[in-house]
Image (cartoon, coloured by chain):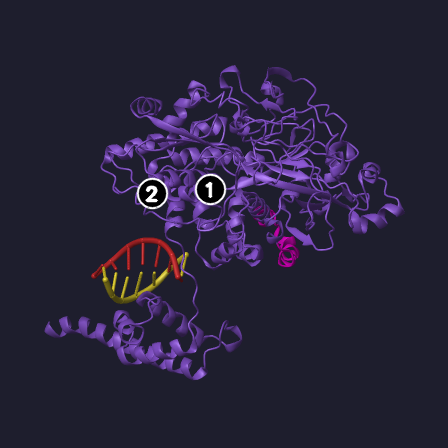
Chain colours: A purple, B yellow, C red
Amino acid sequence: MEHFFFSHMMLQKRLDYSFNGYQVPTKRRATRSARRKATFQKGLEDNQMCAFDLLATVADNLLHEKQNPSTSSDISSEMDKACFVKEECLNANKPFKVEVSDETSCDRICQHQFVKEEGLDANKPFKAELSDEGSSDRKCFSNISAQVYNQNCCLKELSQHEIDGHSCIASIVTSSSCSERFTGETLVDEKGQHRMKNLPSKVELGSSGCLENSGCNLTGDVSKVNDDKFGKVTIDTRNRLCCFEDPLDEKSPTMISSCRNSKLYGYDNNMPQNSLSKGCDNVLIDNRDDDENFSGCAHPITKIKSFRPITCIDDRKKKKILSSKYHKVVQESKQDTQSNGVVEENLKSVYNSRKNYYKSQRSQMNIPFKKRKLFNCSSDANSNGYNKSGDTSYSPKNNTNQSVSCSSSGTSKDQGTSSVGHSALRSKDSRVKLRIKSFKVPELFIEIPETATIGTLKRTVMEAMTTVLGGGLRVGVILHGKKIRDDNKTLLQTGISHDNHLDALGFALEPNSSKNQPHACSAINSLGSASGDMPQPLIRYPSSPVIIDKRIQGFSNMLVKHQVTGFSNLVESDHDSTPSPIISGEKKMTDSKELITVPEIGMEALAVLPVHQKSKRTENAQRRIRRPFSVAEVEALVQAVEKLGTGRWRDVKLSAFENAKHRTYVDLKDKWKTLVHTARISPQQRRGEPVPQELLDRVLIAHAYWSQQQTKQQLKHHSKPCLLL
DNA sequence: GTTAGGG
DNA sequence: CCCTAAC
């Protein structure tokens, strides 16, 4: 693989594109929801919103995933009530808040749905915007940077940062710039026993006022490795900072940037999401396994200083990766992830909860295209947290809800003690409000031949994005740089409710699973131009290069478009894409496989782009919009079937639905099937637009008749021989 | 390309 | 509606 990569590099002159912090785009499903979304996004030019979507989606997914059967009903009801309000945020670089109950276990934080509270008054403008003056170079912060600013804590320095999180950390920012407030529904703790008696800690964090002053410096055992003129400090935390249980995770570089000057990522469009203002002291912490594995995610000024393709892995691992089949890898990854106690379940539950998911999807954040497919195939393989980082901000201001601030939370630290007063507060306000400004898509590096077409480039980028986003993400909670793994811990227990800790709270987008699917590519071929003559585009992440077969290009264009023109028309065409579609031969396949394998390595260190065939397919072939049959159609169908009989669906189609392009003979056949079923069940059990009983009766009659005919035919067939004998 | 049937 | 096997 390396070999291939190398030679390829040598032979092909490539253009390197690096994308940083893409705000998460949206899905490319053309379903109803997608369309709504499109409409919705029409006016949306702010990429930032995408991040919002992503976050919401992730949260939503997680929410579902985590649902406990016992609590599911509650949750679902909440879900219904809750909605993601994107519109409000669209134009704005407004952070949204997440309100979490103290009781909520840590992981729950990520699972909230954000509900907008209208009562919110506009907060003060977010001061902490990063200026991009520093440079365009600065876009290297793909991985987050998350700082929590607490009014009370802004000046406080973080004493220790242990980072065991994944590469992407959503930052928590104390900004109250958002005029909209999103409150997350508090979820019921899955395990009742874990509930702590919380003090009333409704903690409203964040204050715009403090931003200027809030300095969060990383201190502790970190050693300064590098300091650039911009004040970025790269800290090599090595293993010390790694607390990953997951081996793979360990290698993922984690970066924390702290903004001393409290300049935070702004929601501003113009602002490079990745850039920190000059004034900021950005501290990058690279988590590395060993010296060799250094792979920084952050590339301050100079481009990718630490990009190393594959070297990051020890030989044994490499070997393993190279040799192993994808599925094997996937399994492994699953296991690994499971150690975290989430992945598997998540995947499954996500799929299972799809229904609810859609239900709650008012916000149109539909990411989940076919969850099932996605998860089955590639979800496992997703990219590491390399995806995006987000900012969470606390709003310190006493907004309507923020009755209790850090101070109270401090008190609440004693779990045992709950005074009456507290209880009163608790009942209503024991919430920790978090405002997550955005999640960013981490830096992406794409290498593509000069000869590639723009369309290819677009697709490539899109694919990369899709892979990252679609692969399945989960949210990690990081406190003081330390990843909180115990999902059952309450916020209170964890200290999130406490002001002392709020400043160190961060969220990271992590890969839900870790491996890529092997065959990912095959389906992708159609898109591609990938043929023998066309050089294949490569997409890789900074530290761990991920190579995507060009065949995977499916969505790339979306991304680009997004970048350039915003969301509308994301999905578009191949027309400008590369022409030659077919992959020449096995060799190509082999290559692609190899290419695909690369990611695995990357997984170790960072994010991997999962390439899966299904996902691609999903992309291309969207599920058709559901179009319930009208009574008139049913009647026409019944009539046609009465005449023609079952088993001649093509004829039925031609005779009765010739002009209904959207009705295929398969559809008619299916409809008939359902009609028969409907006719047999009790009226109470029927759903949807009621079909006149008369028609149903005819259905049964016709069905019986034709079934009989069919049987007769068969008997004839069989009997004939007998007779002959 | 159609059918049939499971999902 | 999707997906597939079978024809």
Relative image position of residue A430 (x, y in whole percent): 78, 46
Q: Between marks 1 and 2, how big is the CA–CA gap? A: 24 Å
Q: Position of residue A424 (x, y in %)?
A: 85, 50
- The residue singled out by tag 2 in the image is A524
Q: Quadrant of the N terminus of chain A?
A: top left
First in sequence, mark 1 or 2: give its number: 2
Circle nearer the viewer, 1 or 2: 1
Label 1 crowding class (10 Å Cα cut-off): few <14, some 14-19, many 20+? few
Tag of residue A564: 1
Chain at numbered mark 2: A
Q: Using the image as rendered, state which of residue A264 and residue A321 is in the foreground.
A: A264
Q: State the residue in front, A590 or A619.
A: A619
State which quadrant residue A155 falls in: top right
Q: Write the residue at 50% across / 42% down.
A: A472
What amino acid is at disc 1?
A: Val
Q: Please, what secondary structure does the residue beneath circle 1 have? A: helix
